Image (tube, coloured by chain):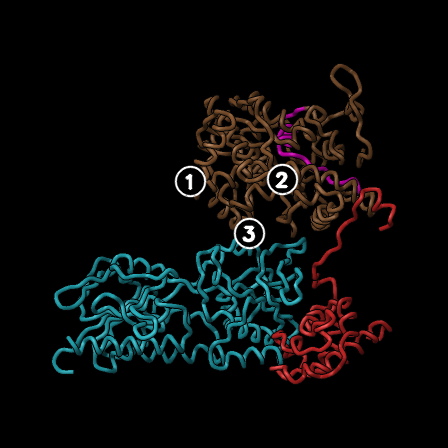
Chain colours: A cyan, B brown, C red
Amino acid sequence: MKGTPQHVIIAGGGVAGIEAAGTLADLGYRVTLVEKGDEPGGHILQWHALFPDRRPAGEVKSYLRKRIEHRNINIITRTTVEKIRHHGGGVAVNLSGGTEEKADAVIVATGFELFDARRKEEYGYGIYDNVITSAELEEMFNRNRIVKADGTVPSRIGLIHCVGSRDEKVNNNHCSKVCCVTAVKQAIEIRKMLPSCEVFCFYMDMRMYGPYYEELYREAQEFHNVNFIRGKVSEASVNINNRLVIKVEDTLAGRPLRMELDIMVLMVGMEMAGSGMKLAEASGMKRGINRFLETTDHHYGNNLSSIKGVFYAGTCTAPMNITDTISHARAAVAETVRYLNGK
Amino acid sequence: MKPEGKKRIWAEYQKEIPDDHFFYVRSCIRQTFFAGSEQYFLKILRDDLGKDVYEDPRHTTCTGIGYHGDVVPFETIQAVVARHFALATEAGYKHIAISCVTSFGIYSEILETWKHFPETLERTREDLYKATGRTFEVPETISHTSDIIYKFRDEIARKAKYNLIDIATGKPLKVVEHIGCHYSKMFPKYGVGGAEFPHVLVGMIESWGGDIIDYPERRHCCGFGFRQYLVQANRGYSLFASRKKFESMEPYRPDMIIANCPGCTMFMDRWQYTIKEIEGITYGSDERGIPVLTYEEVAGLILGYNPWELGLQYHNVQSLQLLRKMGIKADPAERFLAKDGSRLPEPANLING
Amino acid sequence: MSIDQANKFGFTINRSRLIDYDASDRKVRDYITAREPSFRLCFACGGCTAACTAGHHTTFNLRRMNTYIRRGEIDPLREEVTRCMLCGKCLLVCPRGVNTRNVVAVAAEAIRKLDRNEL
């Protein structure tokens, strides 16, 4: 690249935004990374360990941190991109706070939000003491302490798959892809931390789609005595001892099943982030029926928007794991560079 | 349990309940088995709260039991309900107050059907006109009568002579609420508080001083069904469902059950006798049974009405201990005495009689 | 429930179909798992049941039997174990390599011990 380096704005400093920023910077482009939180990193910052190998999340976090330690990258935090519009031959973005930034291209990497578990009223999240989300369990792992709300140690934990995913009742027909394997990973971690605690996964289908996921599932059965019950939990309540009571069909037995739990973990799914939706609305970017950004072709154009100079990276287009998010971000960079070279 | 979580859900499911001018439609079961409840709904609204409630003697059954029992087609029940709307229209009323949860479910289902399939509304207009020559306006609101008592619960509390409090200990009474399935399970938005954590009866109990019991089978159907109890041999199904609830609430030692559905009130009351006969088990503290009251009966007690005029003596499970706990003086000897001094028929096999 | 009582009302109280996980124990499952650890690997594909000779002329269902063992539902299990003809066809098809034939044999043994209060 000769002369003044071309400038790319990246909306969102999660895994996709960071990887795209780092890759562009390595290629000599000037990058402005706009992150709405206090620091870049995204959802992984909360996570303790990653599937399928249960490696510490810290290893990937430190990779991501180093990825954006680059003189070509300017990081703006506590800021969102509110609107993208064409300006001259390039683009201009409006940032929250009223400032404006000009660039040659934009990569949208606004990511996902975890499903708000309160919307599944029948599970009593926010009402019953010991109903938590998978993200909250991850924080318990971080503190190395899995306890009930009253501080006592649980003897039975149930992980409920598909909370907010594959569920027309909350307007999410899509599968969030990562929750099944997250549940298996978390089940194993619980069994390792609390060997006398029984662990149950309540699933509709076990969607072990990635490399070594099926192996992890097998490991959970073979070595960790994790129990799997096929059926969607329909209701939770508490009994007089403040223990949770769940109703589910054991679909393999063809009979309803009732079970008490000390902690119920809701495997919350992925939804299009609210900030991304606002940005899409303001900028005329199309969204699919699942509310994620719609790409021009889901086979060979899945980083492309229908707006010139705007590209998509990561989970703003669909639920995906970290591996796929990183690959998708690199592909977004390839598409961006191809566009910039043709300018 | 975090109460703020429930409050958040309640705030999301608030429906419009009008302040006045109701067209009242009765329940087949209630006017037969708990006649005092309907009478006192009218009395409380008219005399205590000063509201206008209109009743038309030409109003009929909604045929809901026949509809759910597969003998009345949907087109027919739409025409029957449309006729009720026509009576309301003729009398100049826009707000329907529905005494029965089955009817309430029917009305909700029909209004939703008309909303989504406008051709069914046109067809119903035509059917009704051909059959009766009547025309009607779709009502502005439908309220279950428990919605209306809910709306005025604090006003009732301000006029209270008694509270849901054990006068001996000063502690709140432990109350189980039971919501009829067709109140909000089909259309959560039509129920105060929705379907998972309905607030309609909870709100009354809170306002009147009691403690609500949230027990594991709270949301379970009482088992009333329609085909299930209509066919005698199938009643074991209904009985099983009620017993499941009793066993689940039993550890909490409830002082009473309050229900908003005619069928639930009747079966949860009567089945306690049947279970006693079949299994020898009587629920409740000291095996005295758990009284099952309607919300108007509870409101009536709060307002100081005579329990025997409310009709509590015609429940299978008698409420003598409950009345004593609340400090209500009611002479059991007067239970079956009519106002003119003659003897009323006395039911057999009363629990705790 | 006597016939007299049923006649009095013309009906009885229905029996529960619920699997009440807290009302049973997993002694039989643990006995089987200790002696045939491959039992843990079943993921309920039903290959065994499809291949089963007995299952084609009786209600025997090995896949469901495994579920009963895991849930501690002993009464239906007691009936199931008698139906297997121990031909071993299920062994050939199991994608997880569960020693299915031995699971049935050990389950029958566990039931016998349970009935003699030896479990």
Label 2: few (<14), some or many (≥20) within 10 Å? few
> What residue is pinned by disc 1?
B118
Q: Nearer the viewer, residue A1 or B274?
A: B274
Identify the secondary structure beneath mark 3. loop
The number of numbered badges drawn on the structure is 3
Residue B73 in view here: yes
Mark linked to residue B71: 2
* Amino acid on which the number 1 mark rests in the picture: Pro
* Amino acid on which the number 2 mark rests in the picture: Val
Closer to the N terminus: mark 3 or mark 2? 3
Name the residue at 61% across, 77% down: A221
Identify the secondary structure beneath mark 2. loop
Residue B162 in view here: no
Label 3: few (<14), some or many (≥20) within 10 Å? few
Instruction: Answer with left or right where residue A70 lies relative to residue A166.
Output: left
Q: CA distance from mark 1 to mark 2?
A: 25 Å
> What residue is pinned by disc 3?
B2
Q: CA distance from mark 3 to mark 1?
A: 43 Å
Where does the magenta region start and end? B286-305
